Image (tube, rainbow, N blue to C red):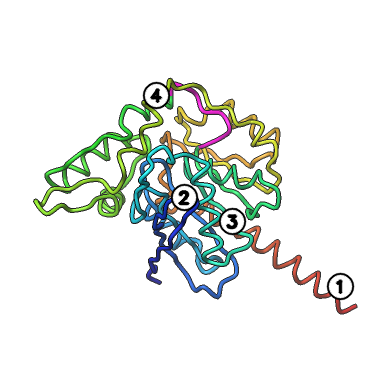
Amino acid sequence: MKPSQGSFPSTATGETVWLGFTEWGPRSNERVAICVHGLTRQGRDFDRLAHALQPDYRVVCPDVAGRGRSGWLFNKTDYHYGTYVKHAHDLLAYRGLGAVDWIGTSMGGLIGMLLAAQEDSPIRRLVLNDIGPFIPKAALERIGRYVGEELVFPSLAAVDQHFRKIYASYGDLSDSEWSEMVLHSVERQPNHTYTLHLDPAIGDAFKKTPLQDVDMWSIWDRIECPVLLIRGANSDVLLPETAREMTRRGPKAELVEIPDCGHAPALMSEAQTDIIRDWLHAWVEHDIEEEEAAKEAAQE
């Protein structure tokens, strides 16, 4: 099934910005998975995962403000997690969604954590792809070296070469997987050059203030929903000791490590998408069993 694309206006920050999303599966499906990308990426990164999750789920993959098909914020200081959480609530309201399962890579996972820690959270289950409540300063400094660059490329081949360098930690992707990433990440200019589909200002936070370790353990400890934690075995963002601690406290995540990659697993190979599909499918079966048991109890 081919996806549909939509957009809606949000005034969460006081200005109006149009937010884009890609949606898979019929709207009649009450089980919904929200897939949210990393800092410099966009929602089409989840095309293969969306395929894998059907027919269990209707899958919605938003482009966070300043990325992909979403508009750029006029007030650049609004590129922060408070804004992204508000936009997430606006997406849920626009699509009339109540409880959802949330799959987040890096930044998308942090947005999911913040939502899951709220009272009356809309998140039933949370999948975190290589992110946790502690991020070391050194990893943020590495990311800050490339985020926010205003780049112009003479060809798609040049974009491909750039991606293979800065996203090398994604793992051993096939040529077709790299090609998919490139095609959904660029905008062709009138002079036949290519630019990236993102606002360079998303990197301002990495440059305006000194970077420090990020500590969100108090957020993690408030989360109560089931959590699947995926970690790239060589990740410098989700350290092994952080991942182990996440299995012992708060929601006590179930941990799966992906060999031969760092931050963050691309979730494009069948082996990786199957991990998420199978974990969520087990919960779907659990929900069905509970629904059937409730019906039987009501009939007695």
Where, by quadrant of the figure, is residue 172 drawn? top left
Marks 2 and 1, how far apart at CA = 49 Å
Q: Earlier in the sequence, mark 2 or mark 4?
A: 2
Question: Quick one: label 1 or label 4, which is nearer the N terminus?
Answer: 4
- The amino acid marked with disc number 4 is Glu
In the rendered view, tell whether residue 35 sits above or below residue 160.
Answer: below
Question: Residues under labels 1 and 4: Cα distance?
Answer: 56 Å
The residue sitting at the bottom extreme is: 299
Q: Which residue is mark 4?
A: 141
Q: Residue 135 lies in magenta, yes or no?
A: yes
Q: Secondary structure at mark 2?
A: loop
Front residue of this view, candidates 284 and 62 = 62
**Residue on which the image places disc 1:** 297
- Considering only order in the chain, which callout, 4 or 3, is on the residue closer to the N terminus? 3
Q: Which residues are magenta?
A: 131-138
**Given the image, on which type of amino acid does mark 2 rest?**
Gly
Residue position marked by numbered label 2 in the rendering = 14
The tag earlier along the polypeptide, 1 or 3, is: 3
Task: Name the secondary structure under disc 4.
Answer: helix
Position of residue 170 measured from the top left corner of the image (x, y, whole percent)? 38, 39
Tell me how far mark 2 sits from mark 3, CA to CA.
Answer: 28 Å
For residue 101, which numbered disc appears in the image? 3
